[in-house]
Image (cartoon, rainbow, N blue to C red):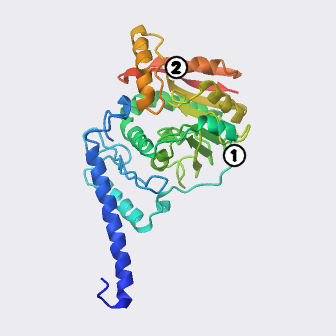
Amino acid sequence: LWTLRPALAAPLWIVAMVAMRSLLLLCAAVAGVQSFSSPPSSLPHHVLSRVQSPRLPPPPTGRSTGIACLRMGPGGDNEREGGAPDAGGKFRRQFLRDALLLGACGCGACLLPEQADALAQITAPPKEAIDAFDKPRDQFLDASFACGMYSGMGDYEQEAAPRKARLFATLLAALPRSDAVVAEVGIGSFPNARFLSQKGAPSNMDIVGVDPNDSMSPYALENARRAKLTQKGGKGGPNTLRIVHGVSEALPLGDASCDAVICSLTLCSVIDPERSVAEVKRVLKPGGKFLFWEHVLSETDAGMAKRQVALTPSQVKRADGCHLDRRTGEVIKAAGFSRVDIDSFDLLDQGFLNPTVAGIATL
């Protein structure tokens, strides 16, 4: 290139670099899809059932982890919005378009949803609490786990969806009709986005997602986009979504700042469940609602309960702290809420995640 006229050399060099970057992104995506034909053994058993979805912004740090994650439909075809196979390849074209956009600008801002004004203030937790509970994390393991949770929990969420929809409908009906502040602790890949955008949702919600795994952010943003949760013209209007780093034992939110707090498959993996629920109470406004959905130790099958206890140490190591043997419902009932509406039931075909407690506690 430098043998050409000097006036053309620099522009051509820039074009060449952008093209190379885009090519590398596409190669990484293809390699990532192929690698998931044999998913990493370090991922928990319940996220390895199948590889499912879509176009994906880069990890929030802006640094490559060597992992690309696609979600696929049951038949192996690329899945577009609504879950139907995209025979015409529309989804693949969109994925390529987004990859080229990222290659050209590198920031990902052009893919983010529109947001309304935020209402709740993000605060700094006490240093001693951060030192005690916000432990150093492995970036590669976080990226692997985030990708696995995003791509492999489709069967679980499909099984849980009818009950979740009813539970969230009850929560949404109890919130202010506008400007409600909702925090989801352990937001993960945000599979609950679609329930917050269902019919009857308040308008202009300020949604704050808290998670210690920073690699979850792009997946959460993608699920919010799919649910049209933060877009103009979406259900409930242009809600705000902010995803912040934090742990349940030291929430980065002020006292009495939230109308509702959500925990979904979160309290199984926290260091201190009792302190986590106490933090939920601290940030709730008087009369605020705590929606919970947690897998627990079986109370109806002694054999399963015995196996859950035996397997918990290995599960903690390979599934980001997940405990199979917790009695989370008892923790919530003993926390001092004015009212706890709780239901215990078993899902189907979800293995050790079948035993579940779910409900809404009122401060």
* Farthest-out residue, top: 302
Residue 296, compared with residue 33, is above or below; it is: above
Disc 1 secondary structure class: loop
Q: Position of residue 268 (x, y in %)?
A: 51, 26
Query: Hey, what amino acid is under mark 2?
Result: Arg
Q: Position of residue 362 (x, y in %)?
A: 67, 26
Residue under the image location 43 percent in, 30 percent down: 317
Disc 2 secondary structure class: loop
Residue 92, compared with residue 196, is above or below; it is: below
Residue under the image location 41 percent in, 38 percent down: 149
Q: Is residue 284 visible?
A: no
Residue under numbered circle 1: 123
Q: Is residue 277 visible?
A: yes
Mark 1 and mark 2 residues within 8 Å of each other at the beta carbon: no
Mark 1 or 2 closer to N-term? 1
In the rendered view of the protein, which quadrant contains the N terminus? Answer: bottom left
Residue under the image location 30 percent in, 64 percent down: 23
> Residue 326 — which label?
2
Query: Hey, what amino acid is under mark 1?
Result: Thr
Q: Position of residue 129 (x, y in %)?
A: 66, 36
Q: Position of residue 321 (x, y in %)?
A: 48, 30
Name the side, left or right, on which 124 lies relative to 135.
right
How many numbered marks have been drawn onto this rendered protein structure? Answer: 2
Residue under the image location 70 percent in, 21 percent down: 336
The answer to which of 310 and 104 lies nearer the viewer is 310
For mark 1, does the 10 Å Cα neighbourhood hold few (<14), some (14 to 19), or many (20 or more) residues?
A: few
Residue 337, compared with residue 198, is above or below; it is: above
> Residue 328 — which label?
none
For mark 2, does the 10 Å Cα neighbourhood hold few (<14), some (14 to 19), or many (20 or more) residues?
A: many
